[in-house]
Image: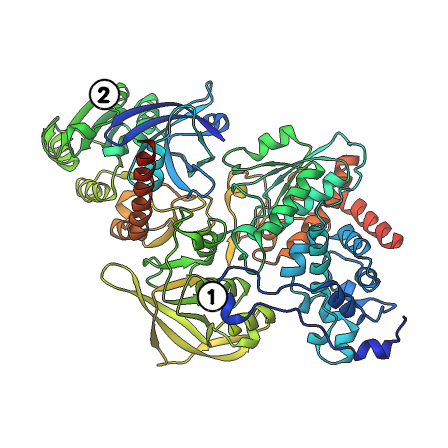
Amino acid sequence: MHTITGKEQLGPDIHRYVVDAPRIARMRKPGQFVIIRICEEGERIPLTIADADPEEGTITLVVQAVGKTTRQMAMMEAGDHIRDVTGPLGKPTHIDKFGTVLCVGGGIGNAPLYPITKALQEKGNHIVSILGARTKDLFILEEEMASVSDRVVIATDDGSYGMKGLVTDAIEKVVKEDGVEADLCVAIGPPVMMKFVCLLTRELGIPTIVSLNPIMVDGTGMCGGCRVSVDGKIKFACVDGPEFDGHQVDFDELMARLRTYAPHEQEAMDRHEEACRALAGEEE
Amino acid sequence: MPIDAKERLGVPPHPMPEQDPKERTKNVLEVPLGYDAETAMAEARRCLQCKTPFCMEGCPVGIDIPAFLQAVEDGDFREGIRIIKEKNLLPAVCGRVCPQETQCQLECTVGKVRKDPTKAVMIGKLERFLADWEREQGEMDVPELPEPTGKSAAVVGGGPAGLTVAGDLIKRGHAVTVFEAFHKAGGVLVYGIPEFRLPKEIVRKEVEYLQKLGVEFRYNYVVGKTITIEEILQEYDSVFVGTGAGLPKFLRIPGQNHLGVYSANEYLTRANLMKAYDFPESDTPVIRGKRVMTVGGGNVAMDCARTALRLGAEESIVAYRRAEEQMPARVEEIHHAREEGVNFHLLNNPTRIIGDDKGWVKEVELISMELGEPDSSGRRRPIPIEGSEHTMEVDVVIIAIGNSPNPLVPETYHDLETTTWGGIIVDETTGQTSVQGVFAGGDIVLGAATVILAMGHGRRAARAMDIWLKTGKWADLPELTRGQIEKEREEQ
């Protein structure tokens, strides 16, 4: 059992949780993730570790309520318990002094991006963060990202905050107009965003690391459900990743595989909502 | 009433009653239903009580088979289970999943006299009977444990090898902690072997029994990630690594990442450990195909093909590149699968998995094979027949062609010497690795093998670990262990 010691709303359906997990807090490195199961009949879902406090013995998770499990989690409060938290899993990010690094985050991707950016800055890299979201309300962790960046460029699809456009537009502006010479790009966000960032950075000749979020079951290399094609070879995101050379990843396949259980997810969610309504009815 | 050998030989074997094949594919309940006391005693009467019990030579953990069969014949079931448990801590499991027909029962004189190994004494079924009998009695006897030695052992991985080590060492007075990566102990017994072949309640009871003996279980501990072997070695006097066969193998053919293509591990883990058969009551889904093709010929392939039927498949097909005689699966499993309506597409190997425009599996292209000269495994090599390519429509494909050892421990602890295929190298007698105080066994050493072989490994390692913990002599351990084995033999 892992107690939720803090919960804070970051945006619509986006929450930050501080969870008691002393060992993971001590062991984790930027780029790693945990697998959680909130209750006995629950599914195992992977979540990237957004931050950790080894002294307090806690880890931070940022979760967007998109499916049944994450919606259930949105209903949990400080003091509630998560049944299982396993980790830290995956290979940590390779942190080195590269020079100038573009840290590109899309939507909830800012959460896993933050600890990596922090570590890269501590190592002496010049950080240009390019952060995007559909609209201003969905923007999270701006302050945190700003605190570990030398420069922050913000873009929203609808122009409600920062420049109007996609992160790729912002990258083009930074590189082509401002003349930033980037030695590395770290891009984390929805797969479609990572795909287009990679198409662009390949053209611009900037090596790019992405962090992938395929469907997982065990997270220890046993099931192969999280397999992705990297340079035409099968890789398991849970043990070989979650970070890969973005220029080698088959994003179309990843996006297709992420849709495998779409009808099941809908069914589970409908049932969940019905149960919630029934419960609300009883209380009235 | 004593009966002579001739009479004993005349008694036909008592088959264990089973759920009707048509009925059982609609549920996940166990297929063989068990013996009643009377049938068990009648079956035990078939044992000739040979002076040289060849059956024992076929048992990887050396159970005193004639003695326990005599106890069953006498109706002294408590004594029977006691004899088994001297050598085997998990009889309810082994009685169900051991390949007895290639071990104890293959060596049985009754089968040999009748020139038919299937007519051997049903040793495995009687082992299961005793274990079930004991469980039904309620409280399991907890043996008196020796004074604590003050020494400790960590067991990495709560599968068959690890559980055996844990039981053996706690009984010798050492403190034992099991580090398990999943939220439940049992390893392949809970994620892999389906409910209808091994009810999970049985595994749970066995784990509970170990807990009663004082074994501590730490769940959600991925060793190498949550805790390192170095840290464990600082806290414990010895370590046993039994992390099993991790990485699933895939075929080297196009289309393996199409939607609806599973490794056997994933398909079975979803269906068993995560209870996908109960979706949406449980949260983990699995694609329930209408036409499901399982690729492979082992027990795991049979488990997948039979699970598919229980998940509602209209047709479950096993594609295997050799013939039935070469299938590594137990005869009983093949028989059960066939009874339930699994179709065998033998001497055929997939060459391509074809998807639709959304990436879902639509068809599998196969090529037919013929058998040539024996290969390094001693089995006749399958050779593709040119121009025999054909396609079959399916919507789920399960790849059940084996696993490589789990890489997490060797990858994060470089001092351990491994083979080119990633298995940990150990001394055969003791399970000692290249690192002092660290032992290993089971599939992490063997590659993909069986539950009982993993338990045999665990047993051997536990014996050596006990000597190591008591003497602190590492270099001499193989010799000391051989001495101990000799002593145990003489005592029998």
Residue B317 placed where, x, y %? 43, 71
Count of labels in the image: 2
The label shown at residue B52 is none
Residue type of the residue flagged with mark 1: Ala
Q: Chain of mark 1?
A: B
Q: What secondary structure is marked by label 1?
A: helix
Residue B254 placed where, x, y %? 33, 63
- The quarter in which the C terminus of chain A is drawn is top left
Q: Are marks 1 and 2 in contact (CB under 8 Å)?
A: no
Residue under label 1: B305
Color encoding of the figure: rainbow
Residue under label 2: A150
* Left or right placement of residue B431 versus residue A19 in this view: right
Could you tell me which residue is drawn at 50 percent across and 28 percent down? A23
- Residue sticking out furthest to the right: B2
Snapshot quadrant of residue B1: bottom right
In the rendered view, tell whether residue B306 sits above or below residue A164: below
Q: Chain of mark 2?
A: A
Residue type of the residue flagged with mark 2: Asp
Could you tell me which residue is drawn at 77 percent across and 57 percent down? B63
